[in-house]
Amino acid sequence: MRKKRFLRPWIMVLPSLGVILAVVIFPLLYSLRLSFIQWDALVPGQKFVGFRNFLQVITDTRFLASLGHTGILLSGIITIEFLLGFLLALCLLEEFKLKKFVTAMFILPVTIIPTVAGFIWKLMLDAQYGPVNHVLSIMLRRDIQYTWLAHTNTAYISLIVTDVWQWTPFMILVLLAGLVALPKDALEAAEIDGASEWQKVRFITLPMLKPVIVVALLIRSLDSLKLFDIVFAMTQGGPGTSTETLSYYIYRNGFEYFRMGYTAAMSYVVLAIVSTVITLLLERLRETT
Amino acid sequence: MKSRLRYVLLAVALVFFLFPITWIILTSFKVPEEFLAHPPKWIPKRPTLTHYVSVSNLGGYRALKNTLVIASFATAISIALGTPCAYSLARFNVGGKNLPLWFLSHRMLPPITVAFPAFLLFRSLGWIDTYQAIVTMHLTANLPYVIWMMRSFFKDIPVEIEESAQIDGCSIFQVFWKISLPLSAPGLIATAIFCFTFSWCELLFGLVLSRTEVVPLSVQLPRYFGQQMTFWGEIGALSTLSMLPIFTLVLLMQKFLVRGLTLGAIK
């Protein structure tokens, strides 16, 4: 009987355990082996090269540049999404007639395929046919035909705007859920003491909301570190290689340049970088269980 | 906050979030002279459905079908395998606190790090351009997600209900099947919708594992964008078709949205 009690729970876990081992752990181990091998479409044969691939990764200027690009995008994305999301969550906090409808409409961008979101904004920003240049033309009273994605700075702005458009609603919803759950008494006491609107937000709401803010920022940081889809849809890493992100550069090495060993080594370097954020997020989630 | 300022901000935000969606939907009904006009024409004067017909010759509906097949199988398999596992983790504490987090950590990995070795392995199996390859790789994200979310939904069920069923002579499999699963049905449906949406939106695995037969929406759409000519009408039509099912599904389970998006960290 006791044996049965011990066995049955494990029987329910084993199929999932097996699948994860087969579809994640096994490929990762295979890739670990590859990372020590020189295997290149241009050079015939495979040979063991020790840590040479890894040395090459950390001295590859294009890899370091892609790390920098990812960093720029990440900081732009999470800063704007947080500020905008917090502001709009505050706006949605109090009851009003159309609140349910407005909240539902805010959710829509989150549900769109990221590639589709990329193309929506590619059309919005089109030099000749796009409404953005059209509105700017009207406002500045001259014909504007600016190619947003062909210049490095505006390509960054375009990618950030697209991500902000798609994921700020996530921030709004999460921060709003956090705001609703806050105890009311501290805010009421501050009100009686004559605190200003800004003081209440700065000294009461923000500190109390901190755990929620940290989780939201970690989730968005993790997604931004892996940024691939909108880069693929909008800039393909261009102009030149100026918007190449980590994931995009790995993709190119593996699927355009066919440098197998090198790609595997680079994957592991990126995995190490991303693991730091994963660990932080897992620690937060452990507390909630 | 001053209420007038609040409404102005919300109105501006509403325009920002909804205008691009409206624009792509309107584009799908415009004739080429309209969507290739400078300055752009806002409202189609002669609305047309031709792009919804022509997109079918360009593999659009096939991509829609492929995405539906991939997302359905990836969801069904993840739920079937993940739910019993989640139950066991929640009730019998199998593997302590670390096993659930170990499962979850796989969802957070950058897909590209798994996609590359998986591509090489599937190539030697001859599985490139098959449903089973893409569905299998979708499990890497969906299965850990189901396990983690369902574990938290099962934990919400009071343990007393299950204990009384066990006293009445039910085995743990029976308790799971007849008591716990029905009680957590809303959570199960929400989790399934989330899995479906993730698979529907996924790009990378679809991109590297498909060629011509099983191309999903996220991979098909960029093919309409060319150096010489861009099929904006078809892009509009396929984008519109790809948005509608998920809008509907997600609006149905608004209540679980925050919990689902934050991995249960915020309820």
Image: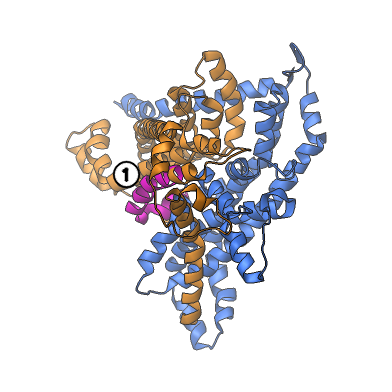
Chain colours: A blue, B orange
Q: Quadrant of residue B87?
A: top left
Residue A261: x, y in percent? Answer: 71, 22
B14 vs A6: above or below: below
Q: Is residue B257 magenta?
A: yes
In this view, which residue lies farthest toward the left?
A: B168
Residue toward you, B143 or A102: A102
Left or right: where does residue A69 sit relative to residue B42?
A: right
Callout 1 amino acid: Ile
Residue A7 x/y as whole percent: 36, 25
Quarter of the image where the C terminus of chain B is located: bottom left
| Side of B9 where A71 appears, left or right | right
- Residue A206 in percent (x, y) is at 56, 69
Query: Which residue occupies 23% across, 40% down?
Result: B179
At a point 24% along the width and 42% down the height, the residue shown is: B182
Vertical comparison of A73 with A175: above or below: above
Q: Evaluate whether residue A289 shows in this view.
A: no
Q: Closest to the observer: A262 or B171?
A: A262
Q: Chain of mark 1?
A: B
At x 41%, y 26%, the residue is A14
Span shown in magenta: B238-266
The secondary structure making up most of the magenta span is helix
The location of residue A5, given as percent across then percent down, is 32, 29
Q: Secondary structure at mark 1?
A: helix
Judging by the rendered image, the residue that carries numbered circle 1 is B189
